Amino acid sequence: MSDAIVIEEVSKRYRLGASAPADTLREAITRFVRARLPGRRPAPEMPSAVARDRREIWALRDVSFSVARGEVVGLIGRNGAGKSTMLKILAHIIEPTSGRARIRGRCASLLEIGTGFHPDLTGRENVYLSGAILGMRRREIDRKFDEIVAFSEIERFLDTPVKHYSSGMYVRLAFAVAAHLETEILLVDEVLAVGDAAFQRKCLGAMSPGANKGRTVLFVSHNMDAIRSRCGQVHCFDRGQLVFSGPAAEGVDYYLKTSDLPAPVTAISLADNPAAQCEGLRLLDITLRNPAHPAVGPCTGDPLSIWLRYRSTRAFASPGFSFAISDMRGIELIRLTTLPISGFPIEGLHPAGAVELFLDELPLVAGPYALSFAFVRVNVAVVFALPNVLQFEVAPSDVYKSGFKPDQSRGRIVVRHHWSHAPEADPI
């Protein structure tokens, strides 16, 4: 089987604080004038070789691997490991500092929200624009158009400029286009995290080996369960270097065992996080509290309070605050929301307010977990999301009063229950 993707000794270096050269006449004139204004600072001295080294960062260093045609391959690793940089090189968004990356076949990419679509064009127009960029003829796009619209589920908004789309609507259409147009290779980054859960499952299903019609898929995700179930092979990155290549199950186990996971916390400030604000809503912080044992923190069987403070310049009719708890493999265990379907709807937001999610009993065994947040509006996909925003540790507890404290060797969920044992009235 021939290789669809070949990476040969690829490295990518960035210079910290370096500004890009002027690429327009306006920028060139502005730079010329500023350099001659009175009181300007003298030109800085050229840094020494040691100083230059300190201002450089290698996002990738001598990475080599290949992907066979028709394979679904995952790229895993902690944030900043070089996964997204590799996809951008393959998509020809950036060039490598050294080495060579070759793609054999027509390639579509879904790397980040806002890439690939023109904001002033409608959804319909962007479908045809994307197809034209891929070298498809109009009749080819016409043949796939109805499938794209049905998959995206945004037919009502098809003739609306995409700049008015929510992030979830954008991703729906962008993935539908990338998955259904005639491409041999698909590059997908963690952008699917902003979609709702049902659409995420649909997208992951479309990338599974049995459904992607022989398309080669390179998939970046922090969802280890999706990687394990959808990918045949994985490549694990760490600090810009390739540290593991092999079967998906072995790669996920390697990553979880060797990752330098952050220390568990019970509170996080979000006031300075640009990803924690959108459409007039700004999150301030999230705090986990154990009302029964405040000094212990989250504990199996104890109550748990998840406290979120916010500031808002809009009222938002029926806003949806959503919290999800996952284990370290990315398997979602709990998801709770304030949308009307939950039975606990919120009518609107205050200029300054707080939302509390209270669990009467935390049903998780001892071990590390990750908390994710999403803000949702009724009949609209996720407005913005903070996946794995806080990692916390659940302390062990003798929840059954048996002297045994359950841990993750016996599942993840603790269920209050009882047994009975008695002889049958009429033994057979």
Image (cartoon, rainbow, N blue to C red):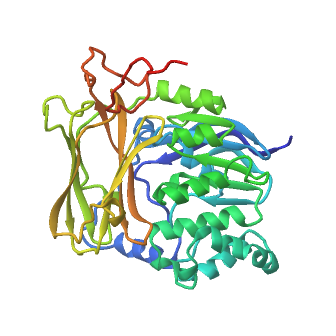
- Quarter of the C terminus within the rendering: top right
Examine the rendered structure and indicate whether residue 236 appears above or below residue 95.
above
The image shows residue 242 at horizontal and vertical percentages of 60, 32
Q: Quadrant of residue 94?
A: bottom right
Query: What residue appears at the point 25 percent right and 55 percent down from the top-left corner?
Result: 272
Q: Quadrant of residue 110?
A: bottom right
The image shows residue 408 at horizontal and vertical percentages of 41, 25
Q: Decide if residue 116 is in sight here.
A: no
Query: What residue appears at the point 43 percent right and 21 percent down from the top-left corner?
Result: 425
Q: Quadrant of residue 341?
A: bottom left
Q: Decide if residue 106 is in sight here.
A: yes
Q: How many marks?
A: 0
Foreground residue, 224 or 161?
224
Examine the rendered structure and indicate whether residue 341 appears above or below residue 122.
above
Answer with left or right where residue 179 lies relative to residue 284: right
Answer with left or right where residue 305 lies relative to residue 324: left
Examine the rendered structure and indicate whether residue 34 appears above or below residue 188.
below
Foreground residue, 92 or 182?
182
The image shows residue 40 at horizontal and vertical percentages of 28, 66
Answer with left or right where residue 33 lies relative to residue 161: left
The image shows residue 398 at horizontal and vertical percentages of 25, 21
Answer with left or right where residue 320 lies relative to residue 353: right
Foreground residue, 234 or 226?
226
The residue furthest bottom is 159
Examine the rendered structure and indicate whether residue 146 appears above or below residue 414.
below
Query: What residue appears at the point 14 percent right and 65 percent down from the top-left corner?
Result: 352
Query: What residue appears at the point 77 percent right and 56 percent down from the top-left corner?
Result: 184
The residue furthest right is 1
- Quarter of the N terminus within the rendering: top right
